[in-house]
Image (cartoon, rainbow, N blue to C red):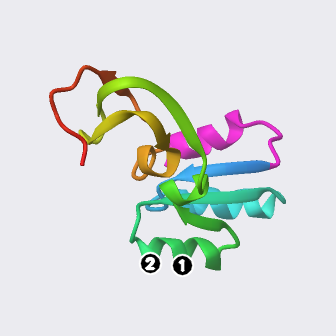
Amino acid sequence: MARRIESLVMAGPAERLGIYGFGAAGHIVAQIARWQGRSVHAFTRSGDIAAQDFARRLGAAAAPVGAYWGEARIALPEGNYEEAISGRAHRGGTARLSELLAEFPAALLIQGSKKRAA
């Protein structure tokens, strides 16, 4: 929990905070931030309805990680890619951020993957 509190302090006077994961210490940080008058966005795993509901009850906006991006897209050079964190395969061209960032708030795409995207 100390790291979460430290992150809140390091955020300085930011009016909006994003919390990835809403478990053990995330809800405490959210309560402190809401008490300070900050807007809190809780990013949870897709399908984690309990965590999303809990975040909303504490006054945070909650959404699965990928849902935040809606229809936003990014252009990738042609080729095959593997997302190093999740292991999923992607094709070059236009990719939806909501798919690239469906489970984690970051993606590391490695070009030249032998995996084939669906």
Whole-number angstrom distance, CA of label 2 to CA of label 1: 5 Å
Mark 2 Cα shell of 10 Å, populated few (<14), some (14-19), many (≥20): few
Seen from the viewer's position, the closer of residues 53 and 11 is 53
Residue at the extreme left? 114
Mark 2 falls on what kind of element?
helix
Amino acid at dot 2: Ala
Residue 36 visible, this orientation:
yes
Q: Which mark is residue 53?
A: 1
Instruction: From the top left corner, tell me how far across and down residue 16 is, in percent.
Output: 76, 50
Q: Is residue 1 left or right of residue 12?
A: left
Cβ–Cβ under 8 Å for marks 2 and 1? yes
**Residue 81 falls in which quadrant of the image?**
top left
Mark 1 falls on what kind of element?
helix
Seen from the viewer's position, the closer of residues 73 and 30 is 73
Seen from the viewer's position, the closer of residues 105 and 80 is 80
Instruction: From the top left corner, tell me how far across and down residue 73 is, in percent.
Output: 56, 42
Instruction: From the top left corner, tell me how far across and down residue 64 is, in percent.
Output: 49, 62
Is 7 a magenta residue? Answer: yes
Q: Is residue 14 left or right of residue 79?
A: right
Residue at the image point whose x is 52% and y is 40% from the top:
3
Q: Magenta part of the protein: which range?
A: 1-15
Amino acid at dot 1: Asp
Is 91 a magenta residue? Answer: no
Q: Which mark is residue 50?
A: 2
Residue at the image point whose x is 36% and y is 28% from the top:
109
Q: Is residue 69 left or right of residue 111?
A: right
Q: 2 above or below 61?
A: above
